[in-house]
Amino acid sequence: DDIMSPQLILEQAVQKELNLISITDHNTVHHSILACKLSEDMPIRVIPGVELTSREEVHLLAYFPNIEALLEIEKEIDNYLPGKKNNSRIFGHQIYYNPKGEIIGIDDTLRQVALNIGLDNLVDFIHGIEGIAVPAHIDKNRFSLLSQLGFLDREANYDAVEASKFKWRKEKFQLGNTWGGFPVIAGSDSHGVEDIRIR
């Protein structure tokens, strides 16, 4: 969100004694790349990642082994966006930060929308550049597999599925558990630094 610079996120994560995180902004990789570079001098590691929105309006987390893969998917993101300007009154400002946490610009591209590529093709593309594809917060009533498609296909090519933090607690999930035949994970889905904590 507007005040969550990569520097601030990393400082908060270190304070919370986290040693591994991922920053997965919607349809943009800028701050994930910056966080990866900043973490090289900190006691924390960052998994390169992004949260994508498929044509079906399913949110899909994508994690990669390196920054080069993020740069590769960035090209595809921009190709599949509608090419419209962001309305900051509706979607907020899309701020670019530098390594010091200073604002250096605003991204005017509308990114809080679906990409013009279907879910299965998006998963295949992620796998093609050595990424891991994880449908996000699949139990939520918006922008999830269950809300948009109505079911979890056991034959799909997902690497895991993500439960919301509320579902994770309610079901008492632990790492190693599965949901619909897929490994299940959870994250903080933080939109404010106060939400950054161990799940």
Image (cartoon, helix red, strand yellow):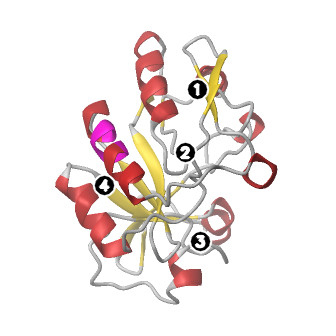
Q: Name the residue located 54 percent from the left edge and 45 percent from the top edge.
A: 25
Q: Does the magenta segment cover residue 159?
A: no
In this rendering, position of residue 183 left or right of residue 13:
left
Alpha carbon of mark 1 to alpha carbon of mark 2: how far? Answer: 11 Å
Question: Looking at the image, is mark 3 or mark 1 earlier in the sequence?
Answer: 1
Alpha carbon of mark 2 to alpha carbon of mark 4: how far? Answer: 16 Å
In the rendered image of this protein, does residue 50 appear above or below residue 66?
below
Q: Main secondary structure of the magenta part?
A: helix
**Secondary structure under the numbered disc 4 in the rendered image:** strand
Placement of the N terminus among the 4 image quadrants: top right
Residue 74 picture location, percent across and down: 37, 43
**Secondary structure under the numbered disc 1 in the rendered image:** helix
Q: Which mark is residue 169?
A: none
User: Looking at the picture, which amino acid does disc 2 mark?
Assistant: Asp
User: Looking at the picture, which amino acid does disc 4 mark?
Assistant: Ile
Which residue, given by chain and number where applicable, does mark 3 sit on?
A: 143
Q: Residue furthest front?
A: 84
Alpha carbon of mark 3 to alpha carbon of mark 1: how far? Answer: 25 Å
Which residue, given by chain and number where applicable, does mark 4 sit on?
A: 132
Which residue, given by chain and number where applicable, does mark 2 sit on?
A: 25
Q: Dots 2 and 4: beta carbons under 8 Å?
A: no
Specify few, some or many for label 3: CA neighbours under 10 Å numbering under 14, 14-19, or 20 or more: many
Image: magenta residue range? 70-74
The foreground one among 26 and 87 is: 87
Alpha carbon of mark 4 to alpha carbon of mark 3: how far? Answer: 19 Å
Q: Dots 1 and 4: beta carbons under 8 Å?
A: no
